[in-house]
Image (spheres, rainbow, N blue to C red):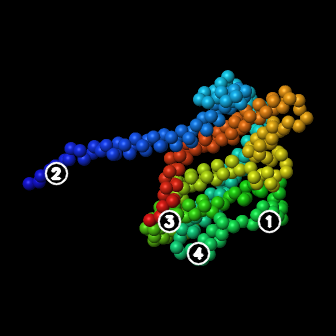
Amino acid sequence: MTTKPLKRKNALRDTVGDKVFYAINGFFLALVALIILYPLYFIIIAAISDPDAVLAGEVVLAPVRITFDGFAKIMQRSDVWRGYLNTIIYTALTVVLSLIVTIPAGWALSRKTLPGKKLFMIYFIIPMFFGGGLIPFYNVMSSLGLINTMWAVILPSILSVWNLFMTKTFFESSIPNGLIEAAKIDGAGQFRIFASVVIPLSKAVIAVMALYYAVGQWNSYFNAMIFLQDERMYPLQLVLKEILIASESTVGGSGETILQQYRLANQLKYVSVIVSSLPVLCLYPFVQKYFAQGVMIGSLKE
């Protein structure tokens, strides 16, 4: 004969201390969310508000005298659309080449049987802390004949050591050795194991790596500014930078012209943030379901 265990009436009830703790946590989380979200919200409302209202500090919680002149001025420029196309090409090629390099390299480094594994690890770690500098970097790119080509923008971005190590850790913690041994018993070679076993189980980290590389290349402008001389090859970020510099130029203008240019530059500053960030924001929901899983699993090791 069995007896049912007695249930404590207050076992699942929160104590007063718990409620206070939750309230404090909720307050601080709301405060952090406000600190993060308000600047983004302000950029949106400032981009569609009258520039004079923004400069006067009237735009705080809602747009004032809504206008889309800034968006119209940006979208009417052919160099912006050309910059969009260039950035899409650079980003797409960077993501594809980066995944081709990072995923196999991460898998190789995760294997204990890799000959010279420690030497490879040291080889990849050193560039994380030491760099040759801009002038040697430029000399290398020049000696390779990559100046003023799209490869000067793409090739330096196809491997991030941090992403490589994150991928390596993901494989170490997420791919059971039993599956690998079973595949070997069935006669599968290393390439077959990687293609048929590893890749299907690695969608999370592949999606995260694709997002990291895509965002990094989409927001990048420094390499293009250093290595590209033809304005027709400029990525979007560099095009928007040139537009802002041109709109802020006050050389040889009257007082009214200077004021108009300042108003235009102030509005374009907010509009350019939205124009350059919108594609990435649209991409994120498609990989969001893999994002947390890929980051958390790849950051832990049993």
Q: Residue 136 carries which label?
A: 1
Disc 2: which residue: 5
Q: Which one is in front in this view, the residue at disc 3 or the one at disc 1?
A: 1
Q: Which one is in front in this view, the residue at disc 2 or the one at disc 4?
A: 2
In whole angstroms, how far apart are the C-alphas of marks 1 and 2?
74 Å
Q: Which residue is drawn at 45% across and 70% down?
A: 181
Q: What element does badge 3 sit on?
A: helix
Q: Which one is in front in this view, the residue at disc 4 or the one at disc 1?
A: 1
Disc 2 crowd, CA 10 A, few/some/many (<14, 14-19, 20+) = few
Q: What element does badge 1 sit on?
A: helix
Answer whether labels 1 and 2 touch (C-beta < 8 Å): no
Q: In this view, does 201 lie to the left or right of 150?
A: left
In whole angstroms, how far apart are the C-alphas of marks 4 and 1?
27 Å
Q: What element does badge 4 sit on?
A: helix
Q: Which mark is residue 172?
A: 3
Near-viewer residue (272 or 245): 245
Give amino acid for label 4.
Answer: Lys
In whole angstroms, how far apart are the C-alphas of marks 4 and 3?
16 Å
Q: Is residue 226 left or right of residue 286?
A: right
In the rendered image, is residue 16 in sight? yes
Answer whether labels 2 and 4 touch (C-beta < 8 Å): no
Q: Position of residue 272 (x, y in %)?
A: 71, 38
Q: Residue 301 carries which label?
A: none
Q: Which residue is drawn at 56% across and 61% down?
A: 166
Q: Residue at x 14, y 50 (%)?
A: 4
Q: Earlier in the sequence, mark 3 or mark 1?
A: 1
Disc 4: which residue: 118
